[in-house]
Image (spheres, coloured by chain):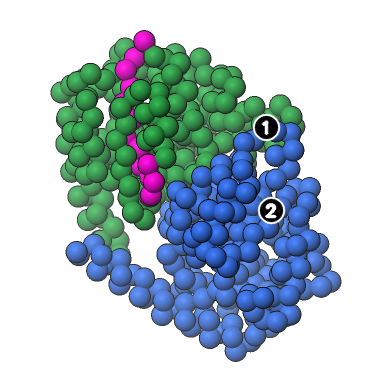
Chain colours: A blue, B green
Amino acid sequence: MKKIDIGKKILIENEKYAFENILFLAERKKLCLNIISSPGSGKTTILVRTISDLKGKIKVGVIEGDIQTDIDAERIRATEAPAIQINTEGACHLSALQISRALKQLPVEDLDLIFIENVGNLVCPSAFELGEAGKIVVLSVAEGDDKPVKYPAIFAKSKVLLINKIDLLTGGQVDFDIEKVKADACKLNKGIKIFPISAKTGEGMDDWYNWLLKSVETNSIYQ
Amino acid sequence: MKKIDIGKKILIENEKYAFENILFLAERKKLCLNIISSPGSGKTTILVRTISDLKGKIKVGVIEGDIQTDIDAERIRATEAPAIQINTEGACHLSALQISRALKQLPVEDLDLIFIENVGNLVCPSAFELGEAGKIVVLSVAEGDDKPVKYPAIFAKSKVLLINKIDLLTGGQVDFDIEKVKADACKLNKGIKIFPISAKTGEGMDDWYNWLLKSVETNSIYQ
């Protein structure tokens, strides 16, 4: 019982800062999306391509969460988008307090959209609200088609599922049943939007961009 | 400070059970290896192939850790090896207490080797000792070659690194610099053994099997 109480206390403390972030973003009418996945599913590559392809249409800033290094923030900055790197020094998820501090370092007034790239982890980040408008879960086809069933929490909580690296399916080297993943994700989460994409080749990215642009335009992810 | 104290208390409690597991395994001269990776790197496929290919040479039992489902234990049981499924119900790692209970359900006396397949997570399981002789970290080439630098703890603590899905490199569809990963892993962990493998095609598996067989024979992972 004690363990549950401690866990609850940490989550309640986190929610307090998450709510502050919601207010901060709402007052400024800025959209914020929290991207969650396993390590290596392609979160940073998706962001780099999205920012580059939508240049001139929307202004994007990024908060990068990593245990160590600023490799990802450097990749984002190469697109000329502002990026704040948070190093969690071992912690397995970002907290709302860290985001609250990072938001104050970003030029938020000049931006249309703020992406938070969470620490690579399909489990822990799903429990910590950061004040985002919605969560985006990324699943690479190389990870296998059983992931929604085995890691249901994040698929149940996300507004969008990006099925990435679909270019690997063309050679037949990877076994991955997209229809099974779609069905399993929809069973957990009826309203989830699913976009099969390749951030490497660009395949499928237009549907994702259209969803993003409409979300920014309406300042709402409920389309 | 309080947060650190709570974390320490949980880890110290865990170590107590881990030490009990070490004694339990040492008394019976059984080797136990703890396999850790991101979701979808191929842990279960590696185990299924290893158990099948070494049938008649060593007897293997498996403790399967998953948040939900018993898909993985079923895949192991299809090889006729005994498998105990632990469902963590949301928790992001296995604990030594869970392993202590599972060891009592396995026919340990009849086995030469016990694999623990941890929850798919490259971060949290690295902090929790389970009483294993050594940790095996699996990295799929689809996850990218920056992972040792970005998630150093598990690469620093593991005795073996299995670089899996190397069949994906032949088509040139995946960019992954094996030499960079080897160099980065060795920088973190001078003695780490590294085996590039494909559990799908069987490529490179013989070196891994030789290491395993010698470890079982000598009841030691220090070769």
Q: Position of residue A170 (x, y in %)?
A: 74, 38
Residue at 48% across / 83% down in the picture? A20
| Label 1 crowd bin: few (<14), some (14–19), many (20+), radius 10 Å | some
Residue at 44% across / 67% down in the picture? A128
Q: Is residue B17 magenta?
A: no
The subunit letter for the residue under badge 1 reads: A
Q: Is residue B66 magenta?
A: yes
Residue at 56% across / 84% down in the picture? A24
Res. A102 visible in picture: no
Quarter containing the C terminus of chain B: top left
Q: Quadrant of residue B154?
A: top left
Q: Position of residue A216 (x, y in %)?
A: 71, 77
The subunit letter for the residue under badge 2 reads: A
Res. A127 visible in picture: yes
- Residue interval drawn in magenta: B56-70
**Residue at numbered disc 2:** A196
**Residue at numbered disc 1:** A173
Disc 2 secondary structure class:
strand
Which circle's residue, 1 or 2, is located before the other in the chain?
A: 1
